[in-house]
Amino acid sequence: MPASDGIEPLRGSGLDGTDAQRIYRYMLLARVISEKSWLLTRQGRVLFTMPCDGQEAADVASAYALDRGNDFIVPYARSLGAMLVKGMTTQEVMLNMFGKAADPNSGGRQMPMHWGYKKLGIISMGSSVATTIPRAAGVALASKLRKQNAVTMVYFGEGSASEGDFHEGLAFAGVHRLPVVFFCNNNGWATSVPVNLQSAEPQVAKRAQGYGFPGVTIDGLDPLTVYQAVKAAVDLARSGEGPTLVEAMTIRMMPHSSSDDHLRYRTQEELDAERKLDPLPRFRDFLISANLLNEESDQAMSDSVDQEVEDAIELADAAPSPDPDSAMDRVYAP
Ligand SMILES: Cc1ncc(C[n+]2csc(CCOP(=O)(O)OP(=O)(O)O)c2C)c(N)n1
């Protein structure tokens, strides 16, 4: 359906109706990929997954605020929505999930959801959380020295903000006023450790003050709020004013990973209550009230997303595995 004016001008976010519809489709796509990947692990067809259910608004709308052709993303495993916005296709995501040779992230050699795609400006992550944070400061330093006018955005969870790497990365970026946005997805959990056992000060954004730049805490379940806050941070970074720490408050609707059972440390009642905050129905209701979506167009979008993911699964499942002789490639220097 055509993008009408809707709720003008989309609550001052700087986005128009077409942007809002695109963001919704990316959110839906991330959700369906996440849900189907979970089922594929249960079927024994995929080795591992880290669901992103509950943080689609944060991931998608933050990446949407970047200049996607020029800026860099240093992701973490749950950044699926940001990967899609940055240009990774559903097929490429599924080739990664199935560990196939044509996976552009690592040729099927890394764990699933360990992103890194040079062509798209997605810097390779690693399993060790927060090591990406000083690396993102380094990427931002390089782009500043090269006068690329690029912004780097690094994604991590609040648990990672307790690591030494977090503090070193922020200190360096603050001193050198680097064009970097630190995007913390605060879902309240680091695997089974709740936020109150991670730090005596649970508001991560406050830590930015110690390094001489702004920190903001925002509703990470509302894509318009996320876009607005991240766009301001990206603009600041691009204009030479240095970093911002954005803390998006989100939820973790699923277990930490396919290797986890969250009912060993969370109650069903708590999970049921959290599910009511799901950002997808909330944004869908907003779009309907803004006359940017109706039952029919929502169903059509949902069907096309389902088909896209099913086609990608079929293709990835049938694709060739990496050659066993390549197992040591890029592990040791020749
Ligand atoms: C340095 C390091 N320590 C521990 C782990 C194991 N581990 C993987 S994810 C994770 C939790 C991370 O929590 P958070 O940063 O809040 O992100 P979330 O998974 O909640 O999105 C841990 C402890 C790891 N991968 N790297």
Image: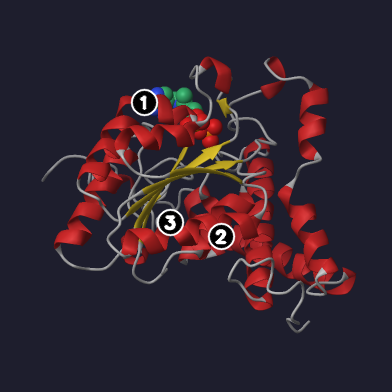
Q: Residue at x 41, y 32 (%)?
A: 207
Q: Earlier in the sequence, mark 2 or mark 3?
A: 2
Report the residue marked by disc 3: 233
At 71% from the left and 20% from the top, the residue drawn is 266
- Kindly identify the amino acid type of the residue bearing the numbered disc 3: Ala
Q: Which residue is mark 2?
A: 227
User: Does residue 124 appear to the left or right of 224 in the view shown?
Assistant: left
Position of 193 relative to 88 (above/below): above
Q: CA distance from mark 1 to mark 3?
A: 23 Å
Q: Secondary structure at mark 3?
A: helix
Relative image position of residue 196 (x, y in whole percent): 57, 18
In this rendering, would 249 be left or right of 320?
right
Q: Is mark 3 within 8 Å of ligand 1?
A: no
Any atom of ligand 1 within 8 Å of the CB at mark 1? yes
Query: Which residue sits at x=69%, y=66%?
Result: 11
- Residue 56 locus on image (x, y percent): 62, 51
235 or 188, which lies in front? 235
Residue 92 can be seen in this image: no
Contact, CB < 8 Å: mark 2 with mark 1? no
Query: Mark 1 Cα within 10 Å, few/some/many (few <14, many 20+)?
Result: some
Q: Residue at x 41, y 69 (%)?
A: 67
Q: Which mark is residue 163?
A: 1
Q: Position of residue 300 (x, y in %)?
A: 80, 72
